[in-house]
Image (cartoon, rainbow, N blue to C red):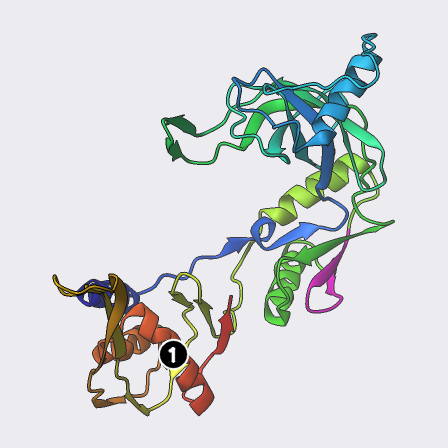
């Protein structure tokens, strides 16, 4: 495992030492038009046609209640106190994203997620489900056969499962019923909102737009650019299309190191540097072995009984941590080479990076997720 980590870091260091080519990004990739946005939709529905893998109705009474209400709307009235034992029905939550400028009659993709204890939604059919927005208004209707990207089987107390079975997707399963009014800009201006705050990138976007349309753009703050646009709607769309296609070289982001404490992943960006420092890192391991010891009375003993006790052996091992000097690193490639020279694994790096940050040697923001 240690050798594998060294190989990975060496490959990353080699790739970073190669000459880099600066590529410009389109404004479309760096910013969005204010007011042009998606909207989230949600609904509650029923999935039927399951092969005995639905909700256990004794533990999910809301599934039975939903079935009774649905049958009542369809003209089927059940006697009061009827105890339904359903295994082919599952209560689900349906979610979808309504894109900007979506018109009634257009199809959208939906995601169906079990909210009860159904074992699988594979082979099920979602019944007609209204999808509502944050204002509790219905904007789409969903229905269709669910596609689940997994499979499972069980027999004799043993089971096997591949991927997730309680979430499925219906491509084009939602039909838009209501349009959300979307205005492109306010009055004579449109606003470009950057995906992340950066004053340098905002200034470069303003310069790029003014180079094509003099005195048309001005910076509002570190995330917004105000652009004067034509009043005619068709001309404004063409104007936005030309602006989105302009190339801009974004500014370098701040130095940051992201550490995932759950998986041990460590990700650094190109701006990370390292001051000269000395690091000594050793490993401490504790091994505990427990084995049963059986004590029996002698063959001629009149009294006594067999007693089982536990005997534990504790062993502590420590690996010597040699003191190593980490030279000043001017770029990420040198930082990776310096950390690789320690011989640390990815788990060791979590502690080393925190110590380097506390000592002031790591010139980057350390973020633990």
Q: Is residue 164 above or below residue 260?
A: above
Q: Which residue: 80% across, 37% down?
A: 233
Q: Is residue 57 magenta?
A: no
Q: Quadrant of the N terminus?
A: bottom left
- Mark 1, residues whose alpha carbon is within 10 Å: few (<14), some, or many (≥20)? few
Image location of residue 136, percent across then percent down: 85, 37
Secondary structure category for the residue under label 1: helix
Q: Is residue 63 above or below residue 2?
A: above
Q: Which residue: 46% across, 88% down?
A: 358
Where is mark 1, residue-wise? 351
Q: Is residue 26 above or below residue 274?
A: above
Q: Which residues are magenta?
A: 215-228
Image location of residue 231, percent across then percent down: 84, 43
Picture quarter containing residue 209?
bottom right
Q: Which residue: 69% across, 64% down?
A: 223
Which residue is farthest top? 75
Which residue is farthest front? 302
Q: Is residue 60 left or right of residue 52?
A: right
Q: Nearer the viewer, residue 271 or 19?
A: 271
């Amino acid at each position: 495992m240690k050798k594998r980590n060294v190989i990975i870091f060496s490959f990353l260091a080699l790739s970073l030492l190669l000459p880099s080519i600066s590529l410009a990004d389109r404004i479309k990739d760096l910013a969005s038009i204010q007011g042009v946005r998606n909207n989230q939709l949600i609904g509650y529905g029923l999935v039927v046609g399951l092969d005995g893998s639905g909700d256990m109705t004794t533990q999910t009474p809301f599934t039975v209640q939903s079935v009774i209400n649905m049958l009542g709307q369809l003209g089927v009235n059940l006697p009061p106190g009827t105890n339904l034992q359903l295994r082919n029905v599952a209560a689900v939550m349906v979610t979808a994203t309504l894109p900007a400028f979506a018109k009634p009659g257009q199809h959208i993709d939906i995601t169906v997620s079990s909210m009860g204890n159904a074992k699988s939604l594979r082979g099920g059919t979602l019944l007609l489900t209204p999808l509502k927005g944050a204002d509790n208004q219905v904007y789409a209707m969903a229905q269709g056969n669910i596609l689940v990207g997994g499979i499972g089987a069980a027999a004799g107390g043993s089971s096997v499962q591949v991927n997730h079975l309680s979430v499925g997707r219906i491509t084009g399963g939602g039909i838009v019923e209501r349009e959300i009014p979307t205005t492109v800009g306010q009055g004579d201006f449109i606003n470009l909102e950057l995906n992340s705050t950066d004053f340098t990138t905002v200034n470069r976007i303003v310069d790029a737009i003014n180079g094509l349309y003099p005195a048309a753009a001005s910076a509002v703050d570190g995330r917004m650019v105000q652009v004067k646009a034509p009043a005619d709607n068709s001309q404004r769309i063409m104007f936005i299309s030309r602006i989105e296609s302009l190339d801009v070289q974004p500014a370098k982001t701040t130095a940051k190191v992201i550490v995932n404490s759950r998986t041990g992943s460590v990700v650094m960006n190109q701006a990370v540097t390292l001051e000269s420092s000395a690091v000594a890192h050793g490993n401490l391991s504790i091994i505990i072995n427990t084995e049963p010891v059986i004590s029996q009375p002698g063959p001629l003993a009149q009294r006594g009984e067999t007693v089982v006790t536990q005997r534990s052996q504790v062993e502590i091992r420590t690996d010597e941590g040699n003191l190593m000097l980490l030279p000043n690193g001017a770029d990420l490639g040198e930082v990776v080479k310096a950390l690789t020279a320690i011989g640390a694994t990815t788990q060791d790096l979590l502690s080393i990076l925190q110590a380097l940050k506390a000592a002031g040697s790591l010139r980057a923001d350390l973020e633990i997720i």
